[in-house]
Amino acid sequence: MVTIDEGLRQKCPRVALGCVTGAVKAHAAPEALTAELAATAQKITGLPDPKTVLESAPIVVTRRGYKALGKDPARYRGSAEALLRRVISGKGLPQINAVVDVINLVSLESRLPIGLYDLAHVRGDVVFRAGRPGETYKGIGKYDLNLESLPLFADADGPHGSATSDSERTMVTAETSKVLAIIVSFGGSETLDTWAQRMIALLERYADATAFTTTIV
């Protein structure tokens, strides 16, 4: 079960989450998925001014959400903005496995942060809340992340993901068989089901995914 902390909701009244669970196979991304990622990146870099995507509504409201919680969005960016900036700078997209690559594709398309978790390593219910003083975790491929005031996901064992960067504890690997993906919107729930269905379709196509459930919180 995923819930939103009342304290976070008071500061970000339009926050909403699109939650998707399903069985997957986290094998290497097939060529067709790699081609879709490349085409999406090319569509962005081919714009007259690619940086205009950084002022799209979902990016702007995510920044506002971070500010409302007391986190500087210029230092701690939402994961969708970080992906877009990577594309614009010509660095390309990381290729991890079919599941992670699908989530990155949907994040690029929607401009929304998406958390992705191996359910085998999530314990108990999950709450979306602001980080507390002194809270940290080791981000995927990164140093310890300062979680204070960051919008994050925590289970019974503590924080394990955020709208900026997820933790190593619950990251998806080749051994992952069931996932929880959470689309984060600070601008309301209106588009969340559309993007959840897009994610499901891609996971079915590229990661042999089955047995989906979806919930809008």
Image (cartoon, rainbow, N blue to C red):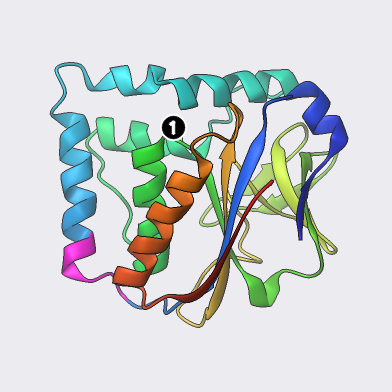
Along the horizontal axis of the image, is 70 left or right of 112?
Answer: right
Along the horizontal axis of the image, is 92 left or right of 119?
Answer: left
Q: Mark 1 sits on what residue? A: 81
Asked which quadrant contains residue 75, the reply is: top right
Q: In what quadrant of the picture does the N terminus appear?
A: bottom right
Q: Say which of 215 and 159 sits in front.
A: 215
Q: Say which of 204 and 86 sits in front.
A: 204
Q: Which residue corresponds to the image point at 36% horizontal and 71% vertical from the top-left?
A: 204
Local packing at callout 1 (Cα closer than 10 Å; few below 14, some 14-19, many 20+) is: many
Q: Is residue 106 above or below residue 160?
A: above
Question: x%, y% of residue 36?
Answer: 20, 54
Q: Label 1, secondary structure: give it.
A: helix
Asked whether residue 124 is drawn in magenta, I would say: no
Question: x%, y% of residue 195?
Answer: 44, 46
Asked which quadrant contains residue 215, the reply is: bottom right
Q: Amino acid at mark 1?
A: Glu
- The residue segment tinted magenta is 28-33
Q: Which residue corresponds to the image point at 16% horizontal and 57% vertical from the top-left?
A: 35
Question: x%, y% of residue 49?
Answer: 20, 16
Asked whether residue 30 is drawn in magenta, I would say: yes
Question: x%, y% of residue 13?
Answer: 74, 24
Q: Say which of 196 and 125 sits in front.
A: 196
Does the image show residue 102?
Answer: yes
